[in-house]
Amino acid sequence: MGCGGLGGWIAARLTRDGHEVLGVTHNLEVADAIRRRGYVLRGRDATETVPGTAVAELTDEGPFDLALLATQPTTVVDAARAALPSLRPGADLVCLQNGICETRVAQVAGADRVIGAVVGWGASMPEPGVYDRTSDGGFVIGRVDGRRDAALDSVATLLGGLGRVDVTENLMGARWSKLAINCAISALGTIGGDRLGRLIRYRFVRRMGLEIMTEAVLTAQRSGLSLEKIAGLFDLDQVALTPREALASSSPGIALKHAILLGVGVKFRRLRSSMLAAIERGREPAVDYLNGEVVHHGGRLGVATPLNHRVQRTIHSIASGDARSGLELLRRVYRDSRREVRDAASADYRIDRGRASEPGDLERAG
């Protein structure tokens, strides 16, 4: 369900591996291109065409053994509803989106039929039916309740032809780690209007990325989640700014964290924000499912998330035409957020010091 960059690449590779795959996309140009010439996969050294089948709407097809939901988060529930009548009884639905979509799909399909797949690589569709894989990586899959069963292992085997697959009992910990990364990478790319590799070279952009991720990490920690290391990148608990670092402009620890983000920029240098692509196509960006998720849960848990909130508002302004993506807009968001970010960091620092002064906490605080 969904034949954009990610969905189209997965559908093509599974088809090439001998599976019967039907692509479903509301984009008539994409569906027509796939029907006429197949999926066109462009690699570093060669271009490959994989004959495929795509439709704009499900009618009498099926029953299918599995639904792979590869739409934007904004339409994932509608995609799940559309897929359900064409699935065999009890068949699972796999959420491939960024964000926390499993709970939303569970409301229409039932929690026992939902599998989450955290995707550690990227792909784009520069023109209808043509796909570029922009970065390498694998998957982390699991169920929200942590159980492992034959259906989950079957999905792991299915996706194994596309990259390494790790099965986790801590799906929400993996989801929130990826959410923290996406809140930074996708939002910065949308506001900055450029690929990650170019933007991450600027120190203020890296600082914003660290602050955005820190707010997400603090929110996840307050939720009681144990964050997972995702896609061989880094430990989010270690990359998040400490309260003292959040109030400082430089330190050895901050320099190390900047260096880590530079490494991420190299790995994902070709990555272009899917939210930016959605806006360019006149579609709703998924910011409410990324940065908005952090803002929502942060507000519920008493965690200040001023930068994610400002980013959320800015991206809505871009989508409505009231602001224009570009480096200057990114600088303005950074500059205008300094007071509220410092105020939040000061509050965290006071809380952190207050906790360390409680009986028995000094030893635990190190």
Image (cartoon, rainbow, N blue to C red):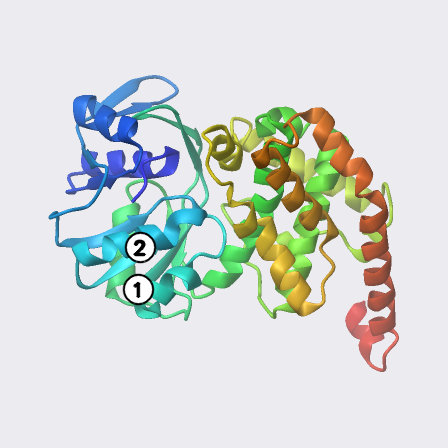
Q: Which quadrant would residue 198 be assigned to in this image? A: top right
Crowdedness near tag 2: few (<14), some (14–19) or many (≥20) residues, C-alpha within 10 Å: many
Relative height, residue 220 to residue 12 (above, below): below
Tell me the SS state at disc 1. helix
Against 101, residue 22 (above or below) is above
Mark 1 and mark 2 lie on one chain; the one further toward the N terminus is 2
Residue under label 1? 109
- The image's mark for residue 23 is none
Q: Amino acid at mark 2?
A: Ala
Residue 280 position, x and y percent, is 49, 28
For the image shown, how many numbered marks are present on the structure?
2
Q: Secondary structure at mark 2?
A: helix
Q: Residue at x 59, y 52 (%)?
A: 292
Residue pointed to by mark 2? 80
- Give the percent coordinates (x, y) of residue 86: 17, 54
**Residue at image location 22% in from the left, 42% down from the top:** 57
Whether residue 217 sits left or right of residue 4 in the image: it is right
For the N terminus, the image quarter is: top left
Residue nearest the viewer, comparing 270 with 356: 270
Three-letter amino acid code at the position of disc 1: Ala
Query: Do tag 1 and tag 2 residues touch (Cβ < 8 Å)?
Result: yes
Q: Nearer the viewer, residue 126 or 164?
A: 126
* Residue 3, percent from left and from top: 31, 36
Q: Is residue 137 visible?
A: yes
Q: Left or right: where does residue 326 sit relative to residue 114?
A: right
Near mark 1 (Cα within 10 A), the count class, few <14, some 14-19 or many ≥20, is many
Horizontal side of 40 relative to 343 (left or right) equals left
Coordinates of residue 342 in the picture (x, y in percent): 85, 50
In the rendered image, the quadrant that contains the C terminus is bottom right
Q: Is residue 166 visible?
A: no
Residue 107, image quadrant: bottom left
How far apart, in angstroms, are the residues tagged by discs 1 and 2? 7 Å
